Amino acid sequence: MESHAIILTKAAFDHGNLNIRTCGPNFFPEGIFGGSTQDKLGEQITIKADGLPNLIKTDIPTDATTGRPRWLFRERAWVKTFVRVHRLAKGDLVIIRKVGNRAYSIAPSEPQSLDVSLNQQIHSPFRYAGGKFYARKLILEHIPEHSYYIEPFAGGASIFFAKREAQKNWLNDIDKDLMNCFIIIRDYPECLIDRLKNEVATKERHGWYKNVYKPVTKLDHAVKWFYINRTSYSGIMFMKNCYWGYHDKYSMRPENWPQQILKCSHKLKNVKLTTLDFEKVIDKAEDNSFLFVDPPYFNADQDKFYKHSFKKSDHFRLCKVLEKNSKRLKFLLTYDNIPEVREMYKWATDLHEKEWNYTLNRTDDQRKNAPSRKGSRYKGQELFIVNYNSAKQPNLF
Ligand SMILES: C[S@@+](CC[C@H](N)C(=O)[O-])C[C@H]1O[C@@H](n2cnc3c(N)ncnc32)[C@H](O)[C@@H]1O
């Protein structure tokens, strides 16, 4: 039986409005559309809402001026009871199913069926240049207990997705397209999935999204970002250096994108997402927050990877703002292991030298003189700089 997901917006909680536009015009019988008021009802359908005793009878009203469907059920007093009974929140999904001739059922979607809990390690929805996916185990070992988790340079946020979710979470990145895609994944996952559902990963589609497609809405921008990111070499999104890089063996296939989007949406549900400059985030962070700080490398040609260049003066600015807030915040900062960085952070509590393995055609290496042979094994060598006593933690995350 045909079914569709409906995302609960604020209007569902305030007025009982369920946005049923995504169900499409053919999901409901033709005569369902009535006038703008109760005087002219359309042919009603019945809805069995999970957990409610009575069947609901309703049609869909049209707009008094344009005569177009308003894409919500006329009868909607029941929605407020339904969301209360199931303890639903804004952004949750409910599933509407056609179960017979003019008969429908509605029930909350079950996050358990996605096999994800907030404590589960999942992967970022994105591939990301400079991402810390391959270093996640080493990083998690040094994260102290905390209740507010913040990433001022989120990128693909691979550490956020790998760790247990804190009570409060804040992801920030100056790249507006990246953060728009995170916001769409958090708030409108079904709309993104719907738009990507017939996609195939081909060089032609990649070229079309990159050079021809002109996004208008925020959803359009997210579709473009997601498609290009999943099919580009190393997930590089700086258009001048963004090339086709999908490989059936290594890349996530389009049929698995929906599941990944839903898992990430679930984990992002109560996460604050912003596009500020890092300095504001660090200055505004609540006392005792823990910050995972992963800026662009000091000694790398950053202009190749990110839309916003990060200058030497920005590195010094970062050092200054971290030192200024060091007494009230905890941070773990990752950097390239070079004398200039060691010198800048000699005031920090601890510096750890770390190495990890990765394979080039699965990830990227943004440093100068990095080996360029595809597929070769390579060691990442970095510094973890912390302002707290960071002996390995008892596997809290
Ligand atoms: C090394 S990446 C972060 C990677 C991320 N930790 C991950 O695992 O995917 C650095 C990020 O800093 C962002 N960035 C650059 N300048 C910034 C600024 N002034 N404020 C905030 N973010 C900035 C870039 O857009 C980029 O996404």
Image (cartoon, helix red, strand yellow):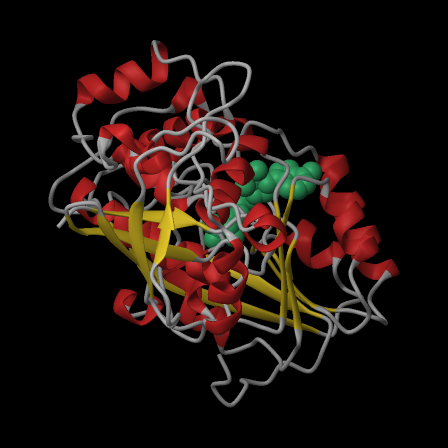
- Note whether 354 is above or below 188 in the view shown: below
Query: In terms of image quarters, where does ligand 1 lie?
Result: top right
Q: Viewer-proximal residue, 10 or 277? A: 10
Quick one: which residue is furthest to the bottom in this view?
394
Q: Viewer-proximal residue, 29 or 213? A: 29
Q: Position of residue 212 (x, y in %)?
A: 34, 9
Please name the residue shown 27% across and 16% down the image. 207
Determine the image quadrant of residue 51: bottom left
Left or right of 8 in this view: 316: right
Quick one: which residue is furthest to the top in this view?
212
Please name the residue shown 69% across and 50% down the image. 340
Left or right of 47 in this view: 388: right
* Res. 380 in view: no
Q: Viewer-proximal residue, 206 or 20? A: 20
Q: How many numbered marks, from 0 up?
A: 0
Please name the residue shown 59% across and 85% down the image. 391
Please name the residue shown 45% across and 39% down the image. 72
Q: Viewer-proximal residue, 132 or 166? A: 166
Q: Position of residue 236 (x, y in %)?
A: 40, 33
Q: Position of residue 60 (x, y in %)?
A: 40, 36
Q: Position of residue 308 (x, y in %)?
A: 61, 29
- Note whether 262 is above or below 361 in the view shown: below
